[in-house]
Image (tube, rainbow, N blue to C red):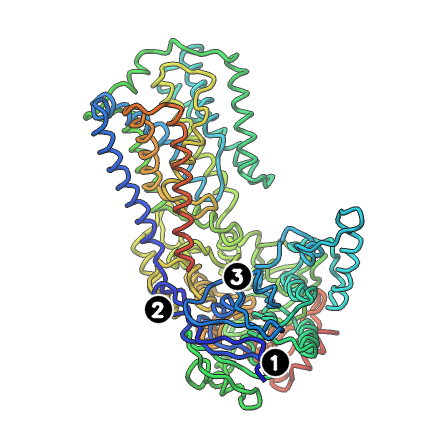
Amino acid sequence: MDNNIVLKIQNVSKIYPGVKALDRINIELKRGEVRALLGENGAGKSTLIKCVMGVEKADEGEILVNSGTGEWKQPKNAIDAKELGLYANYQHVNIARELSVAENYFMGKLPKNKAGVIDWKKVYSDSEKVLEKFEIDEIDPRQPIRSLPAALQEMVTISKISLNDNIRVVIFDEPTALLENDKVEILYQYIRELKKQNVSIIYISHRLEEIFEICDSVTVLKDGKFVGTKRIEEVDKNSLVEMMVGRTVENIYNIKHFEPGKELIRIEGLTRKKEFQDISFHVREGEILGFFGLIGAGRSEVMKCLFGIELPDSGKIYVDGKETVIKSPKDAMKNRIGLIPEDRQVEGLALELSVKMNINMSSYDMISRAGIINIAKETERANDFVKRVGVKTPSVGQLVKNLSGGNQQKVVVSKLLCRDPEIFIFDEPTVGVDVGAKQEIYAIIEKLTRNGKAVILISSYLPEVMGLSDRLIIMSEGKIVGEMDNEELKQATEKDVMAVAAS
Amino acid sequence: MKEKGLRGTRITKHTEFSLILIIIALFIIFAAFSDSFLTEYNMMNLLKQCSIIGVIAICATFVIITGGIDLSCGSVVGMSSLTAALCMTQFEFSIPMAAILAILVGGVCGLYNGFIIHEFKVPPFIATLGSMTIIRGLIKVISEAKTIAGLPEEFSDFSSSSFLGIPNLTWVWVAVIILGFFILKFTRFGRNLYVIGSGQEVARLSGINLRSNTYAVYIVAGLLCGLAGVLLTSRSNSSVPTAGEGYEMNAIAATVIGGASLSGAKGSVWGTVLGTVLMMLVDNGGIQIGIDPFIMEISSGVLITIAVVLDQFRNKKQAN
């Protein structure tokens, strides 16, 4: 019977200076079981995974892997973990961005031919097989990873796991954060295939819908403590959220909507030849305009033009009724357009700097005279926004890299609020953000529209973009292929929207 | 979860605090083991040594905070020195005119660095490695690799005299320190440097003009090196073709010892000042207590290594 268990986490604790990240965690994982691991940001999921993978050492307790020979072994380091058949899709960690897809696939085990040199033919043909299997054969295995969009990079990381042959446990840490529905489906297929081979899965995601789709059981952590393990039939969305946050949370997309006022921005025939064509739309005061589309639909690219990061080939932008040329983010800000960028770690935050500097970063001109900053105001503003937006940080002097994902995103929002724009662009604002923080971000969006700001919301997550938007624009292959108003949105199902987006 | 970790600000203070302790300890050791260390002559000498490298180290700090590096510092010092000397001897310019021109030539060198780095997206290491060699070559061509001597006496008087018992050179350094501190602490330009050092993308999306700031930081660096070149010429009362050679390494070392990170976004004027003092103190004191000069050469290397290793430990602690 014991042999049916593949992984035992026994009484594991991990203490970081000043905080108990894990507090006597006990988990047993059966062969072929797909276990969801849930918890808010900072609940200890990542720490637990790191301990399992041998990247961090637990301070107390044991992590035991059934080695198949009836012997239980404890992975002491990352190499050990691999030898015992533990794999994980650590984002950004186990890929070398400068190397090609094929080199990444065969890293450390490039096949040699008879002459003892690398058999590139085999490398590429084997790589192509993997790419085909995961339906991402638009990728050339010779392409360097960094040239791929984020979603495809993620697919490469996931598909890389399939190249190992002694797989016992695979840990997926938010694999779908960047994936569109069709790619998610491919991932599910792979998970089901692994399950059939009696491989066990630990699946971490903030999207509860996915848990019900793919998992057999679920373990919830909160503040480093074990809350409970349940079979999936025993729980529903509400009870899971309750376990995670310790209180009931009603429909999180249920925010107040307001009667839109005058038009704040109008785009006409915006075109950037290789990315999108003839894009026209407008947003009014107090309105949330949603954008949905699959990978390569061109949503983010349109917003990049709107924010002056890229220049359009043709088309017009009217802000407040006046035709405006936006050549740089600085121009965009002058026209009171603000952006929450898609990649908050690279585009939104200066991770090495303090919360205070991050919040003030894009609006120092508003609190300085002749280039000299009013230091008192800088601190005052930072403290003010930390309080208003609810950033959890011991002080505004804390470095942003030490904050959790949700709090980092709140810093980005604060930075934008500090600039006080009229038109807000939110590009995937809740990726990697837990339910609690999500709700707070939605509350901020609600408050913005109440105060008559215009909001453009881009999201790959249908429940979110459908639940929050007053109007929804659907893009596909660089064109607008559908638009739904409030009434239509209420009637529509996710399937309807997908059908339009995939057309 | 990690929010409760150590605070960033406290750690930098920690760096500077330990530097002060080390400096005081070394000072006591040197004073105890050498009769010539704590003499007025040697103290003046130490201050002067610190001053010239100190000015360059401030400019290195600015550049390093942006995540860049300026290897051409030493060559720019040499070029400025040559300009000052030529202006005074060949063209018979007044001393202030010659000094201003020399500083401006430094600025032009910086402009060139900024141009290559920003417009052609050449990594700063490569761009300034190139200009380092180009400028040094130019110096040798123009001066025909000869020393230019016979500068007006008033010029060298500046560096040999003192005001309120402190060498004039040091006053210049102090002025640069105050200015540098002010820029980093109180101006938008200063803040922009940190943001750029943390990431070019985030800087751009935050509305920071990368072009003007990149140009500005390398021009400021050039101007400061130009100033250092004038000081050096005044001190040696001549211009040698090798003037300033290797100074960039001393300046970068002082900055790193002071807690700056070569990956950007970290560094402070006070740290750099202490780093400069520590380096020069080891050099000066070591010789005073009779350590072999060849062994002394090893010391600065050891110092940098220890400083960076300690920094790595601190980072690791902080990450946990």
Kind of element beneath mark 2: helix
Marks 2 and 3: CB-CB under 8 Å?
no
**Which residue: 44% across, 32% down?**
B249
Which residue is nearer to you in this view: B181 or A119? A119
* Marks 1, 2: nearer the viewer: 1
Residue topped by disc 2: A387
| Crowdedness near tag 3: few (<14), some (14–19) or many (≥20) residues, C-alpha within 10 Å | some
Image x and y of residue A180, in percent: 65, 71
The kind of residue tagged 3 is Asn
Residue at the disc numbered 1: A33
- Based on the displayed image, in which of its 4 quarters is residue B169 positioned? top left
N-terminal of the pair, mark 1 or mark 2, is 1
Label 1: few (<14), some or many (≥20) within 10 Å? many
Where residue A369 sits in the image (x, y, percent)? 35, 48
| Looking at the image, residue B63 lies above or below residue A265 | above
Q: Are marks 1 and 2 on the same chain?
A: yes
Name the disc covering residue A77, or none. 3
User: Quarter holding the C terminus of chain A?
Assistant: bottom right
State the quadrant of the N terminus of chain A: bottom right
Residue type, numbered disc 1 = Glu
Q: Which mark is residue A322?
A: none
On screen, residue B115 above or below A199: above
When the figure is inspected, residue A52 is found, relative to residue A322, above or below; the finding is below
